[in-house]
Amino acid sequence: MTADEREHALTRLRAMMAHTVANGCTPNEELAAARQIGRLIVQIDGADLPPDTPYSLGDERQSPDYQIQLEKSTLEGLFKSAVQELSLGHINTLSPPRQLPPGQKVEWVGVADMLQGHLSMALGISGSRLGRELLAVAIEELIQDGMLPDRLAVPVGP
């Protein structure tokens, strides 16, 4: 394989690796991309492609590994959705969307710090180190994804 062919194969590999359910693909498209990635890796390594063997998509979906991954991603998605809903409710209680009068003093508060304590109590996980860590990761991911603000202007005084 020449350097240009290798670079082209690596570019295709990176593009195929972006085909995930998280990026908007269907599970079938993600599985097809994963199979193609395997073939591309074999090509890049310089080995012969393994012969295509018939397989059933149903068999693959029934595998224990697939079921564990599906359950994990579903639970993580539900947890993040719950954290987002509770966070937005708390944020709107503290600082409802409104236009502040001119000259109104505000205090900028970090949302992650503010939500950590409140949601730990609301979800009943304040006594669990693992629960607090999972909550902190979910809040940070929601902030990085733009689903929650990183800081909040809370009015100070009258």
Image (tube, rainbow, N blue to C red):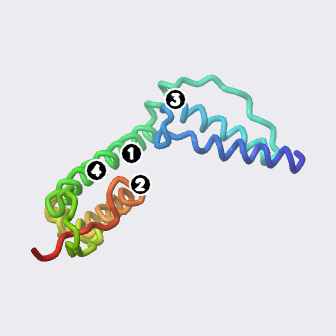
Q: Hey, which residue is sitting farthest front in the picture?
A: 102
Residue at point 17% right, 66% down? 118
Kind of residue at badge 4: Phe
User: How busy is the neighbourhood of tag 4: few (under 14 within 10 Å), some, or many (20 plus)?
Assistant: some
Foreground label between 3 and 2: 2
Q: What whole-number distance in Å separates the C-alpha atoms at marks 2 and 1?
A: 17 Å
Q: Secondary structure at mark 1?
A: helix
First reached walking from the N terminus: tag 4 or tag 1 = 1
First reached walking from the N terminus: tag 4 or tag 3 = 3
Q: Secondary structure at mark 3?
A: helix
Kind of residue at badge 2: Asp
First reached walking from the N terminus: tag 4 or tag 2 = 4
Kind of residue at badge 3: Asn
First reached walking from the N terminus: tag 3 or tag 2 = 3
Residue at point 20% right, 72% down? 104
Asked if the residue under mark 3 is in contact with the one under mark 4, i.e. CB atoms within 8 Å, the reply is no
Q: Secondary structure at mark 4?
A: helix
Q: What whole-number distance in Å separates the C-alpha atoms at marks 3 and 1?
A: 16 Å
Q: Which residue bears the numbered disc 1?
A: 73
Q: Hey, which residue is sitting farthest left in the picture?
A: 158
Q: What whole-number distance in Å separates the C-alpha atoms at marks 3 and 2?
A: 25 Å
Foreground label between 4 and 1: 4
Q: Which residue bears the numbered disc 3?
A: 28
Q: Which residue bears the numbered disc 4?
A: 79
Q: Is residue 87 above or below residue 69?
A: below
User: x and y percent of residue 33 in the render?
Assistant: 60, 36
User: x and y percent of residue 134 in the render?
Assistant: 31, 61
